C-alpha cells in the first residue's frame, strides 16, 4: 500500500512539474525578446553588469518579477514601461525562452 501511495505521489509530481514547465513557449518568447536583448543580451547574457543576466533564471521567478513591474509592486523606471504591454502569456513565453538559455 505504501509503495502504491509513493508511486502515485511521484507520478502526480511529474505531471504537475511538466505542466508548470509547459506554461511558456520558448520559441514565442524568443520572437518577443528582441526588445529585451538591448539590455539583457540576445541570449539573456548581459554585456553590461548594470543589467542582470536572464539566461538560466527560473521561469516562475522571471514571471513574478515581470508581473511585479507591470503592477507597480516592484518599482523601476526602465522596466515598468517594458512590462506594461506584456500579457500573462507573453511573460510566460519570455520566461521560458530565457530559462532555456545557458548562463555564460
Image (cartoon, rainbow, N blue to C red):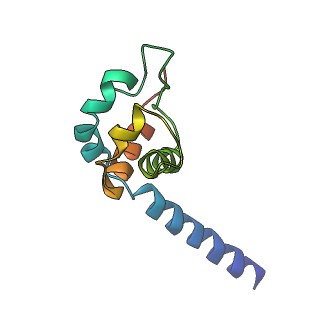
Q: Quadrant of the N terminus?
A: bottom right
Vertical side of 4 occupied by 50: above or below: above
| Residue 41 makes an appearance in the image | no
Is 59 left, or right, of 31 in this rendering?
right
Q: Which residue is outermost to the bottom? A: 1
Vertical side of 88 occupied by 3: above or below: below
Q: Which residue is outermost to the top? A: 48
| Residue 5 makes an appearance in the image | yes
Quarter residue 97 falls in: top left
Of the pair 28 and 86, the residue shown nearer to us: 86
User: Residue at the spot x=38%, y=52% of the render?
Assistant: 92
Q: Position of residue 6 (x, y in %)?
A: 70, 74
Of the pair 89 and 18, the residue shown nearer to us: 89
Vertical side of 25 occupied by 81: above or below: above
Q: Position of residue 57 (x, y in %)?
A: 51, 37
Q: Position of residue 101 (x, y in %)?
A: 41, 32
Is 97 left, or right, of 55 in this rendering?
left
Q: How many marks?
A: 0
User: Residue at the spot x=70%, y=80% of the render?
Assistant: 5
Q: Position of residue 79 (x, y in %)?
A: 41, 35
User: Residue at the spot x=47%, y=60% of the render?
Assistant: 20
Q: Which residue is outermost to the right? A: 2
User: Residue at the spot x=47%, y=22% of the render?
Assistant: 51
Amino acid at each position: 500500500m505504501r509503495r502504491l501511495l509513493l508511486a502515485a505521489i511521484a507520478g502526480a509530481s511529474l505531471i504537475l512539474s511538466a505542466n508548470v514547465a509547459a506554461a511558456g513557449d520558448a520559441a514565442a518568447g524568443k520572437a518577443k525578446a528582441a526588445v529585451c536583448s538591448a539590455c539583457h543580451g540576445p541570449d539573456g547574457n548581459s554585456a553590461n553588469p548594470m543589467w542582470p543576466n536572464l539566461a538560466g533564471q527560473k521561469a516562475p521567478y522571471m514571471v513574478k518579477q515581470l508581473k511585479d513591474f507591470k503592477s507597480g509592486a516592484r518599482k523601476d523606471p526602465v522596466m515598468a514601461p517594458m512590462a506594461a504591454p506584456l500579457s500573462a502569456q507573453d511573460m510566460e513565453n519570455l520566461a521560458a525562452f530565457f530559462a532555456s538559455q545557458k548562463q555564460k
